[in-house]
Image: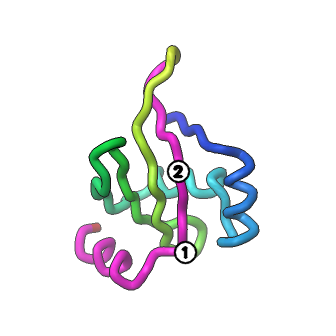
């Protein structure tokens, strides 16, 4: 599984939310809740554990000359509603 993201945005998120995209990749290697949230472009929200917190990550599935990858768009600490979705579906 490959990931790509904007490094500058990752640094801004780390300052604002305590983690960046580098850490958020951890979410995809454990059970997580997945839901499509947008059709054009197709975007997904993945809700799962990163370190000791439950986070939501928006991403798009893209391809380049090498292969498919996840383009990480944004992340935040999961809301109460997102926590319930995760608990009900994971």
Quadrant holding the C terminus: bottom left
Q: Nearer the viewer, residue 11 or 22?
A: 11
Which residue is label 1 attached to? 53
In the rendered structure, the answer to whether residue 39 lies left or right of residue 4 reads: left
Q: Earlier in the sequence, mark 2 or mark 1?
A: 1
Are dots 2 and 1 in contact, CB under 8 Å? no
In the rendered structure, the answer to whether residue 14 lies left or right of residue 90 reads: right
Q: How many residues crowd around disc 1 within 10 Å: few (fewer than 14), some, or many (20 or more)?
A: few
Q: Residue at x 46, y 21 (%)?
A: 67
Task: Tell me which corner region of the image, top left, top right, bottom left or bottom right, holds residue 12.
Answer: bottom right
Residue at the bottom extreme?
80
Which residue is label 2 attached to? 73
Here the colouring is rainbow
Q: Residue at x 47, y 33 (%)?
A: 69
Q: Residue at x 36, y 52 (%)?
A: 44
Task: Tell me which corner region of the image, top left, top right, bottom left or bottom right, holds residue 19.
Answer: bottom right
**Extent of the magenta region:** 67-89
Label 2, label 1: how many angstroms apart (C-alpha)?
19 Å
């Amino acid at each position: 599984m490959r990931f790509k993201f904007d490094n500058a945005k990752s640094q801004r998120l780390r300052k604002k939310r305590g983690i960046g995209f580098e850490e958020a990749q951890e979410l995809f290697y454990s059970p997580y809740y997945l839901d499509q949230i947008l059709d054009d472009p197709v975007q997904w929200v993945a809700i799962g554990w990163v370190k000791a917190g439950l986070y939501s990550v928006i991403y798009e599935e893209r391809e380049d000359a090498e292969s498919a990858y996840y383009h990480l768009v944004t992340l935040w600490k999961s809301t109460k509603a997102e926590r319930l979705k995760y608990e009900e579906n994971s």
